[in-house]
Image (cartoon, rainbow, N blue to C red):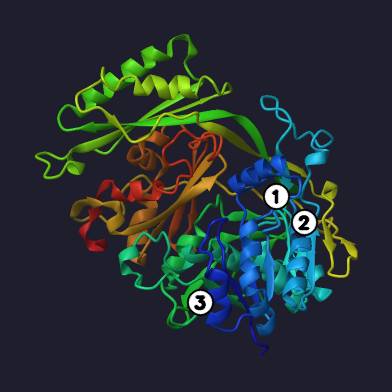
Amino acid sequence: MSQPLRVGNASGFYGDRFSAVREMLEGGPLDVLTGDYLAELTMLILGRGRMKDPDAGYAATFLRQMEESLGLAAARGTKIVTNAGGLNPSGLADRLRELASRLGIDVRIAHVEGDDLLERADELGLADERYGRPLTANAYLGAWGIVECLRAGADVVVTGRVTDASLVVGPAAAHFGWARDDWDALAGATAAGHVLECGAQATGGNYAFFQEIYNVKALGFPIAEIHPDGTSVITKHAGSGGAVTAETVTAQLLYEIGGPSYAGPDVTTRFDTIDLAPDGPDRVRISGVRGVPPPPATKVCLNHLGGHRNEMTFVLTGLDIEAKADFAKARLEAAFGDARPARVEWTLIGAAKPDPATQGEATALLRCAVLDPDPETVGRAFSGAAVELALAGYPGFTMTTPPGKGGPYGVYTPAFVPNGVVEHVAVTHEGKRIPIPPAPAETGEPKPDRQDIVPQENAGGGPTVRAPLGRVVGARSGDKGGDANIGVWARTDAQWRWLEPFLTIERFQELLPETREHTVRRHTLPNLRAVNFVVEGLLQEGVSASTRFDPQGKALGEWLRSRLVDIPEAVL
């Protein structure tokens, strides 16, 4: 049996732990080290940077990490695959070549391009009726440009906007010689890539039962040992912090997904076929993953400049918290007059404890977030009006935010274009340009996932205990543009038999009342003992434009776990 391909990850977002690249290279043997630096918000940030400097548009952090670790990677024979190229993969590849030359390191650097559709936005109909021409327009490329670069001998491959999992799928497909229609192998590698893409979230980061995780050391980053058939084992370097368990892997598999059919440019992965099994300490095997052809359209990430935003936070202390909040709202709303911002959102955060022993225990916060196309409306006119209440407000008036002008925000929207119009190109380390054809022509769109139909009665019967839902379930939540997903998993088979019929859409909306005005879709993943809820539009127009105080929906799962429900004693 051939040796597995050991693929590690050292970055889950632009801003992740800087030292992780060096830690992963020093921690043990790796064939490939990946780094994911891109999210919808990151593309907006890079787009604004490119407006100021046309030569920018890539993740500068990665270049600094390579200054420290490129020689180490070369000495250890570890290939590097990263999407840090952002909006300018060729520019980052050039900077890396200059760096390697200056440091005297002999490495072959290639890149992948073709995802940037901005110059073709009008031709492809990507302009928005409300916001006009996009600031960025990037297609989600797949793994095959990476494959061609590696097959040509590259040591470092820089991409722009490829799907996160493709950073893992590409090296695996190149190493094992997979064909474009090896659907199950590609799906298995996609599942492994989805686990790796957010870094330490797979080793106990943001984990519902975090107190069970060994957190004395900084959490280690994950590794996938990928086999020729696409099965894999998720693990981490020995001695690093955190843990790899079936539940930490489950939590990451549920992160930012929709239905069981996880569509990508390489393959549509059936998440409801994933089997997880322990494979020793800090080792979890992923097997059984089935794949079907990808859809005929490629997703495009569009970012538009939407207007300007600002926010102010009032501190409310002691008695009559709600009355003080109502007073502040009324006075500031009156101060707006005819210049009320286009969107105003008030959020009361926390509550004062009875007989508080500290001032903190006596305090709640009132946040006001505003959006408007006009920077003046939400600038000093807004923040100044809030400050003017200082000597004419409620007793104990103070604020946590100084008056300011606020800043611009972006609006994320997804779009889709036919696969054939995307000019996906691998540029080898020798400068050869290799066009990547779209997915095989005979592929069709997979059947849509059905909506779950579940019984309304509580399963199991017997006496119940009123307790937080989180006593028996974990949850992981996140954002996909303006939608939020909340994946919920049971810890035991008995808890799953209770959870699946219990947590209907109706009960979900009862427990999270802020979702009642939104369409909610529910999907079951029995192999993972999990249900996944997708709440459409809860996050408004995406993280940058959202006025929610949790704009990426990261804490929705913990809110759900804190709600009291009647749980059968038998499953506690």
Q: Is residue 31 visible?
A: no
Which disc is residue 91 wearing?
Answer: 2
Q: Which is more N-terminal, label 2 or label 3? A: 2
Q: Position of residue 231 (x, y in %)?
A: 61, 75
Residue, disc 1: 57
**Left or right: where does residue 493 sit relative to residue 545?**
left
Tag in front: 1 or 3: 1
Which disc is residue 307 wearing?
Answer: none
Q: Pick the quarter of the image with the C terminus.
A: bottom left
In percent of the image, x 82 and y 49: which residue is there? 422
Q: Position of residue 54 (x, y in %)?
A: 76, 45
In percent of the image, x 49 and y 61: which residue is there? 252
Instruction: Give yes or no for contact between labels 3 and 2 (Cβ–Cβ under 8 Å).
Output: no
**Left or right: where does residue 133 sit relative to residue 3?**
right
Crowd around label 2: few <14 · some 14–19 · many ≥20 (10 Å): some
The residue at the far bottom in this view is 1
Q: Amino acid type of disc 1?
A: Gly
Q: CA distance from mark 2 to mark 1?
A: 8 Å
Q: Position of residue 439 (x, y in %)?
A: 80, 57
Q: Which is more N-terminal, label 3 or label 1? A: 1
Q: Is residue 388 visible?
A: yes
Which disc is residue 235 wearing?
Answer: 3
The quarter of the displayed image where residue 481 is located: top right
Label 3 element class: strand
Instruction: Give yes or no for contact between labels 2 and 1 (Cβ–Cβ under 8 Å).
Output: yes
In percent of the image, x 36 and y 18: which residue is there? 332
Tag in front: 3 or 2: 2
Observer-nearest residue: 341 or 145?
341
Residue 249 versus residue 441 in the image, above or below = below
